[in-house]
Amino acid sequence: MTRRSPDDPIKAADPLTRNRFPIHPWRFTEAEYSSDDLGVTESLFAVGNGYLGMRGNVEEGRETYTHGTFINGFHETWPIRHAEEAFGFARTGQTIVNVPDNKTIKLYVDDEPMLLSVADLESYERSLDFRDGLLYRNIIWRTPGGKRVKVSSTRMVSFTQRHLAIMTMEVTMLEDEAPVVISSQTLNRQDGRDEYHVRSAAMGTGVDPRRGVPFETRVLEPQSHWWQDQRIILGYRCANSKMTLAVGVDHQIITDNDYRTFTSADEDTGKMVYRVQAKPGQPIKVTKVVSYHTSRGVPNRELVDRCRRTLDRVLEHGVEPEFAAQRQWLDKFWERSDVVVHGQPALQQAIRWNLFQVAQATARAEQSGVPAKGVTGTGYSGHYFWDTEIFVLPFLTYTSPQMARSELRFRYNMLGAARRRAEELAQSGALFPWRTVNGEEASAYYAAGTAQYHIDADIAYALCKYVAASGDQEFMNREGVDLLVETARLWADLGFWRENGTGRRSFHIHGVTGPDEYTTVVNDNLFTNVMARFNLAKAAELLGQLEREFPRAYQRVAERLELGAEEIAEWAACAESMSIPYDEVTGINPQDAHFLDREVWDLKNTPADKRPLLLHYHPLVIYRFQVLKQADVVLAMFLQGDHFTKEQKRNNFEYYDPITTGDSTLSAIVQSIIAAEVGYRELALRYFYNSLFVDLADLHGNTSDGVHVASTAGVWNILAYGFGGMRDYNGIITFDPRLPESWAGMTFQITLRGTRVKVDVTSGEIAFTVVAGESAELAVRGEYFTVSAGIPVRVSLADQGSGIDGPLPSRTVDRRPDGTLITASVPQAVLLGR
Amino acid sequence: MTRRSPDDPIKAADPLTRNRFPIHPWRFTEAEYSSDDLGVTESLFAVGNGYLGMRGNVEEGRETYTHGTFINGFHETWPIRHAEEAFGFARTGQTIVNVPDNKTIKLYVDDEPMLLSVADLESYERSLDFRDGLLYRNIIWRTPGGKRVKVSSTRMVSFTQRHLAIMTMEVTMLEDEAPVVISSQTLNRQDGRDEYHVRSAAMGTGVDPRRGVPFETRVLEPQSHWWQDQRIILGYRCANSKMTLAVGVDHQIITDNDYRTFTSADEDTGKMVYRVQAKPGQPIKVTKVVSYHTSRGVPNRELVDRCRRTLDRVLEHGVEPEFAAQRQWLDKFWERSDVVVHGQPALQQAIRWNLFQVAQATARAEQSGVPAKGVTGTGYSGHYFWDTEIFVLPFLTYTSPQMARSELRFRYNMLGAARRRAEELAQSGALFPWRTVNGEEASAYYAAGTAQYHIDADIAYALCKYVAASGDQEFMNREGVDLLVETARLWADLGFWRENGTGRRSFHIHGVTGPDEYTTVVNDNLFTNVMARFNLAKAAELLGQLEREFPRAYQRVAERLELGAEEIAEWAACAESMSIPYDEVTGINPQDAHFLDREVWDLKNTPADKRPLLLHYHPLVIYRFQVLKQADVVLAMFLQGDHFTKEQKRNNFEYYDPITTGDSTLSAIVQSIIAAEVGYRELALRYFYNSLFVDLADLHGNTSDGVHVASTAGVWNILAYGFGGMRDYNGIITFDPRLPESWAGMTFQITLRGTRVKVDVTSGEIAFTVVAGESAELAVRGEYFTVSAGIPVRVSLADQGSGIDGPLPSRTVDRRPDGTLITASVPQAVLLGR
């Protein structure tokens, strides 16, 4: 697969090898087996529903980068041992647990195991189908003894029944008869024998903070094991977190061949073995129905019962209705969410793979968060970050608002822990943890963790966007308001007022880290201040509105939160006078108060093998330079674009883009959207490819740790916001498209207060059609209108963006606020090739 | 004992309870036993020689805060597990090991154990004698059966034989006869059964990063155990560091009573038991001779042999010559080092206790460093820091130059590791570890660790001071030059040039932490820049001098270090144009480029139970404010005072003193010296008391973890530099005394190029007398002169400092660089009393 390197920037061209991964509009297909990149393909072919996820391990179980079955939020805790302690440091580590695995269904013909890496495969195809939500594999295998066997299997994690997964395997001897053994297994693999070995070995060669922390001791304590007929149920409890889990499997075999069954179970293993005397042409079809139930502490026997009930229900009516329900769920999902790029089949496939990943990460997450890797891997330890609010929620808000609401309720439920964390940090209000599973701060590196206070504003931002788009004022008034108030409180307390000589007071926020983790603990980080301003203003605005429109609700809120008019007025004042770094000379917004004092890192002369920087330089080295992991000023211009002039946007983009490494997968999304807005259309398209293929082409080299969920949702953001030119400041939806010149057209849909509007963009016009519901208020380039059912609106567009192309002007060198001069430079060690 | 609190600032008054700790000019004596503060008294009565140290545990062994026998540099390593990893983070933890203990000599009379906490003591006295270097204890005990027993013991760690300790116990039945058992023990206690339990319990109630990290598993692996007659030898190896240790004990009994002996040893225990049929008036005298030998990897049997040889040598001539040698060594030490404050017996005792501690921490440290707690406790894990160079080495340089040289050679021997660390941090030259035992960085918290680059300059500073005072140019030319060059290289590479509009270039150092750890990772930290300037200038100067005066030495150095004229010129240029923060409006030097942008922490309104701040606030909270652990600008004005005007010094002192918490014990030293210089004489005296009684009155509440060695040496610094008004910029020794008004006079001595000069200061004059050697060049208030053997010099002094007293003017509030106004404030949580 292609690896991105700084000397070989991604082009707006398809990076996939198409004889291996052929183009198909609705499937991601592998036509040739390879064991060279198992880690990547296991992530790419993972199936999940946001609650339960299974990596795309092969059924045979042997060849693997890492086995993995994950349940969102099911985690073990461990005491963080800081080599040097300090007050308020995170104390409890939280790591998603690799739960007992059910993917292995081994096949033996003539007692010979099928092992893909050495098997003589007459044909091979593996496909993840975006319409029916199944992972398929179809093989014709010539056994060492020369017998041809057809092996077809499917794997599905149900979108409609969150505790349910179904696997099938159908084996047919094509010409010969043979003894066939099918061995379906349930394995608790986690005691350091396989994937954790891989992980430790990998850790040995270097340090990658993006991986999770491996366990060193047994995590899942066996609680019960039981089997009867073709059913097996195992129960476990996490040693420290005391979370409980039960996993049940039920099997069915349909065949006209003679067979015998053997069932067994012990503490860490369940086995269902079929010994079949297979005749040619007589298929053997085994169906495996799997159920996982988990809880924070419900006794194991209760979870065992729940597994039983799930399995019984499926047993009653068979698996076919589940497949149908899956298809139906996805039909509706695509109806609401699909984006069509006309005449670009390769892109089309990749776009749908990405959107499908968002569905797999969020569909049934319900009141859990969305882990950075969804339920596809252990990267980032299964933690929830800000990415969900900023990159995933826009997509959900405009296509599946109910799911957006679930995510926000998850944050609401964390409010108690966030209040305690604020207190620990000597602040009022609530401070949401930078990374967490259970609500407690789990970031042991505060400079790029706890110091990212902006997460508070990110949550407030996502909340306001959801309420504006959905019209769900009731949620806002009942629960959202607490989030808005407690986050606003944090900001008002965290910052402080300064007066300058002329008597003008401004509000400053010091000692925080913005999304760009390549500088930390800075003063007046522009992104943070812009977002905190929004947070403060919205809180004041909402309470004003409540007081006017819902006085009794206001009264309840005021009492519950001990709110007074003075405090609310203070928020408005803080927002009004928020300090926003701006440099007169360059006309840019410095990333923080002192950003321009730093040396400029010369990225052009940094060798490819020193990227990403975070894996090759001590943080102190990186922090000393103007060099970005992701450009958070550019992100601020996206999220709060109505607060920047056109010229500022252009200047900022041109300043920051050349010093942005894109070492975060979130970077390309934002660079693409703003490149499109300010007129770098070719660059916008390149960044789009960069996002689109983050995982599909393993551009960051760590897809094996799981799919980058925020990036997959980012693809939608680029399409709708970047190329569609959509903006939604203050709940007003406007468009100013930037369709790539090479594209014939693009269609996407957005749901606004229950009305679904189809948006068609071509180079000459933009058209809006209500496809469900009544009507919606929209605007194109400042012209407001209403689009109603049956009355589409078409707007002609003369041109789309200024279309500047070619290299960016060099703004970073020779230009300093006070006329001072800095030459771009690199650490000594870079030049020496250390 | 007294605890300092912000509401109860230390006064210039004796804080000790004198009926318990009576005043004696040459002894620190305890006249009443108490088990309430065992941790503190164990540290105060510890004996050591800089190599081997024994806490002042009672002989009976039972009642204890923590047993402790330590060998400087004898450490175990352990992998640091960062909860979040990053490139270049310290990997190997290093912790001083509590070695097998020999202090326990149990006494039973009529089979009743003597236990001080319940014993009926007719008389009790414990004394540490500064002249003969022995710890004495004299008791008359009335046994439960009513028999009176006289018990006298001594404990000595030899200053002349670094591997040797001697203990004696003499027991006399005064009126009755009785069976007496004396059981001398060698115990490897470290397997988590006693002091480590205490420690863990203490850790549980809160976090104190100043403590060491406890071990969780067995450290010392037994290698051998052997006994014969009255001798026992045990051998061990550290599980990870593979350091080896042997401990041998030999016993002697002298008595006219009948007795039997029993000797035994196993892996973790050696026992020598005397069963005596004691007659009244017949003393039983047991002598225990102990030898420790350690190494980085010499096989155990070799160390066992070394123990044997040490013991045999003592056996040959008996212990009396060792006591005599100890006394002789100390006679010479005091001859060189004593400071006499006339007419202040309580101060006199405390001063000598402090100076004696320096001797105990450094005498035989030889080419090891000086741990922050010497060999008296496990605080700071036995690590070496910058304190040695800045606070301990001045005392050694002017009183025991040979010891100063040893310490500098220790740094020279670490140069290889420091070069590797610089490379890891992407820099040229050498970067000394912030904390270490074995030369590798062990600070896992880089913001207040690795980021303290100033340690490089601190070493260079101590080196230049030593060479100037001793005249040991040979050491400089042969080894010191490498230190100077590699540290200068680090600075030249770490910083960068900026040009301002007017074409003036200046040199900046970004992203470093100064000694004040209450702000971290700042730009142009004044202390760092001032000290780096010194380092760069001195390196250039030395090489210029070498080239002129020792061309062949220069050639060798230039080749060895690949030096060229251009690089040397660059250092001079960097020094010349070093950026030194200065604020025109307030007339102060901001602690760093953006220090004045911070809010001012209102210390007056911070409750006592929130001190020290580091134990009650998250670093992010502390870092956001103008509040100091120690005032590093003030320290810079002490070390590089010739670069500041009188007015700057006064302004800076007045600005920083009110926002300085003194949460570091180093703080009071520096505040006292500069308070004296700028004229706050009463405040200088209060800070002096603060330093003098840091341990004696447990002012920081953690003396139980060991003696604050830098603070004990700081006492000399205040006496010589603060009250004596000595300065030594560029090797020129000048005086401008500030004798406290309540003092009749003070006498101290300094050794300059082999000549020892006695300095007498009274309120009316300063007098210099050569007491050994030829002559010395000195100056008083700008008047230069030579003092020669037999020709004392007396200089009349009209007044000593301006003598401003009363409260400092409030400079921190209402005064901002650009006229802006900030009001002092405290975090919300402080006011709420959280």
Image (spheres, coloured by chain):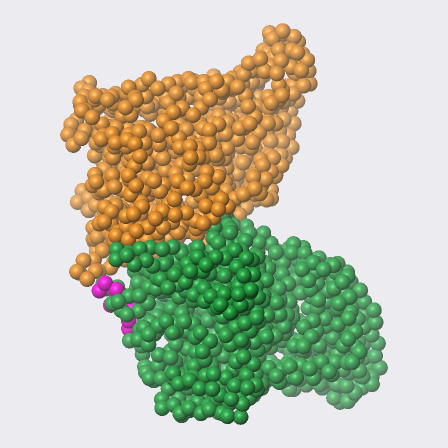
Chain colours: A orange, B green
Please name the residue shown 53% across and 38% down the image: A97
First to last magenta residue range: B810-819
Reply above or below: B402 against B565. Answer: below
Residue B192 location (% of width, % of height): 64, 60
Please name the residue shown 52% across and 86% down the image: B775
- Residue B815 falls within the magenta-colored stretch: yes
Total marks in image: 0
Residue B316 visible in the picture? yes
Q: Nearer the viewer, residue B638 or B75?
A: B638
Residue B563 location (% of width, % of height): 50, 57
Q: Nearer the viewer, residue B448 or B546?
A: B546
Most prominent secondary structure in the magenta stretch?
Answer: loop
A646 lies left or right of B152: left
Please name the residue shown 57% across and 78% down the image: B400
B293 lies left or right of A215: right
Residue B440 visible in the picture? no
B429 lies left or right of A396: right
Residue A794 location (% of width, % of height): 18, 21
